[in-house]
Amino acid sequence: MVRIGSRVPTARWQRSFETPARRGSQPIENMAVYTEVSDGELATFLEAYDIGRATSFKGIAEGVENSNYLLLTDRGPYILTLYEKRVAPADLPFFLGLIEHLAARGVPCPTPIHERDGTVLRELCGRPAAITSFLTGVWPRRPAPYHCSALGAALAQMHLAGQSYDKTRVNALSVAGWRTIYERCADRADEVAPGLAAELGEELADLERRWPSELPAGVIHADLFPDNVFFQERTLSGLIDFYFACNDFFAYDLAVCLNAWCFEADVSFNVTKARVMIAAYRKVRACSTAEIEALPLLARGVAIRFLLTRLYDWLNRVDGALVKPKDPLEYLKKLRFHRGLGGPGAYGIDNA
Amino acid sequence: MVRIGSRVPTARWQRSFETPARRGSQPIENMAVYTEVSDGELATFLEAYDIGRATSFKGIAEGVENSNYLLLTDRGPYILTLYEKRVAPADLPFFLGLIEHLAARGVPCPTPIHERDGTVLRELCGRPAAITSFLTGVWPRRPAPYHCSALGAALAQMHLAGQSYDKTRVNALSVAGWRTIYERCADRADEVAPGLAAELGEELADLERRWPSELPAGVIHADLFPDNVFFQERTLSGLIDFYFACNDFFAYDLAVCLNAWCFEADVSFNVTKARVMIAAYRKVRACSTAEIEALPLLARGVAIRFLLTRLYDWLNRVDGALVKPKDPLEYLKKLRFHRGLGGPGAYGIDNA
């Protein structure tokens, strides 16, 4: 902190003088908006839709690394997304088709808005872009058991509704993809924790050997963290951010949610949350014994998936980058938890 | 960019694997939201107001370095602001009282929403916080003459409406404050441009010597850049971000707008924009000859004010900081432009 003479108030000096990246017309770089859309470009873009005229247009912090804008028109609120490098353009028809399919079947997710000529995927500022419906609700910063219960039911509903979806997409971040990331990290993994490379190597080999090949599968979300789930009061009002969606075991998706929703901030496992989540899931979609038995292994897989991608980001972080990588070790603790279990009973599952 | 084996799609590797700071409940650090408000804290906070229940709550990129949220309730949209370190808490009653005063007199600016007990300034997540009304419109990324004309009229309207406001605030970033900043930068200024320290030193001495003491004064905005002005179609629909507002010469505010609106991206001066801006201003509030004559000097002052704060930020930037400082040299070019003028006629002013 800078100390300075009395003529200029100290408060002005505690951060920088000018707001980051707000002068001129450069892209906004200090938030989750990577492309700035001008008022003129927006007006032209909206002419192709039948959703009225823009009354407001604000960049928001939401979603993966795309640029998301909350667009208000005289007809109501919408979300406009510009897809940045992170999402492969070839995958966009899968994602947009999926949410349209799911929304039409009652899953509370955004649905793409069609242009007058029927198109849902267009181009804006040189990027693929789409407008989707707006979902009310707020994501739970501190998930409670009732959130986990509602989530379990919605996840199962999504799995059932997705069974009639005709496009498919490989899960590049499942077991077949982990070794590639591991090999990119192994020689420096011990910088993060001594012995980490060896521990992950053994874990990975074990998971590759034991990974199931025959479990009920279909379209999964694959990234259903709390910030992708909205609640209005106590009711689940929306699932968003389907940009990791793919075809894989349904139980893998449940294992993502166990990792993302059932650990407390100190990485202790809340078995009450797991129990109600799984029970609510099974009320909507019956699970086979094999699926339940596989849960601890799948949960280890999920933990190593997030551990590896975080480790990669951590080791490859750039000084001065706007992205602050997350601590990979949170998922090492989760991995060890799942590995230490005697069976799925530890998740509070009834008659597993 | 990272090249990697074929099993993982390249697109996934072009940025980081995980969205910045979205896992867990840490503050969102990569955008203009510094404090994260939980759903529970929000619900409790809103109980004191009579504005309905939240249906959506999203961090937005707007304003100075405060945390701004677009809050939708069943009654409509609002803005919730948490004031971060940059704004001195002691100044908040001045700012909030000012926008309420101006809005009541027809200036299109946000007005604070009163709690049921009448309070407008409260605390949320340990920070001063306020809810204000929502303004429709989009700020112009590429200002055209019609924007400048509407801006001039609104600026004059604001100056007139502010004359009956009873609180005052010193402009800490006018002539009396510049030398302090200059002295903090002078020994390293030449790192940015050779000879910069000497040029600024001479300029500053000249401005201090010649700065006017007797011009019409009142409450000014002092930071009316295009991103602080909304338009709905061709109509000016809002002025925002009054967190630099203070008492100073009205013509200084006009000089801020000349600097912020009338230069093109290549720092060439668009005299058409200046002419219509000043003409529209004078239709609403008559300017004295002294004010018009002072404009080139005031515009030099404005240029050095932004140059110095940017220079300070530039020299004191922190590696890895989320804030990317703006190039100070844009304002050196503007400063030289104003210094080279023979008189206010260069701004296209009629019968000056």
Image (cartoon, coloured by chain):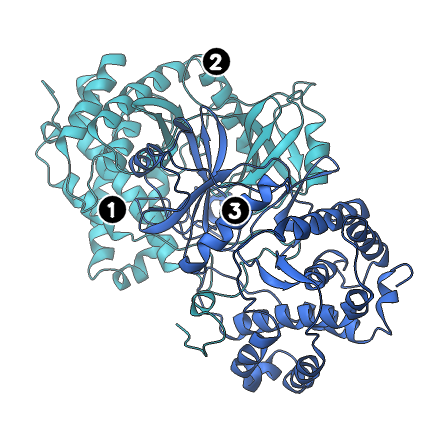
Chain colours: A cyan, B blue
In the image, taking residue B38 as reference, residue A91 lies left or right, namely: right
Q: Nearer the viewer, residue A72 or A226?
A: A72
Q: Is residue A114 above or below residue B152?
A: above
Q: Name the amino acid type tagged 1.
A: Tyr
Question: Circle 2 sits on which residue?
Answer: A104
Find out whether the residues at labels 2 and 3 contact each other: C-beta distance under 8 Å.
no
Q: Is residue B136 above or below residue A220?
A: below
How crowded pointer 2 is (Cα within 10 Å; few <14, some 14-19, many 20+) is rated as few
The quadrant where residue B7 appears: top left
In the image, taking residue A340 as reference, residue B117 lies left or right, namely: right
In the image, taking residue B73 as reference, residue A129 lies left or right, namely: right
Q: Is residue A99 above or below residue B218?
A: above
Q: Name the amino acid type tagged 3.
A: Ala
Instruction: Measure how far apart labels 1 and 2 are at the Cα level.
Output: 35 Å
Q: Tell if the residue under mark 1 belongs to the same chain as the one under mark 3.
A: no
Question: Circle 3 sits on which residue?
Answer: B61
Question: Circle 1 sits on which residue?
Answer: A331
Q: Position of residue A246 (x, y in %)?
A: 42, 29
Q: Name the amino acid type tagged 2.
A: Ala
Chain that bears disc 3: B
Q: Position of residue B12 (x, y in %)?
A: 47, 44
Query: Farthest right residue?
Result: B351
Q: Position of residue B57 (x, y in %)?
A: 42, 35
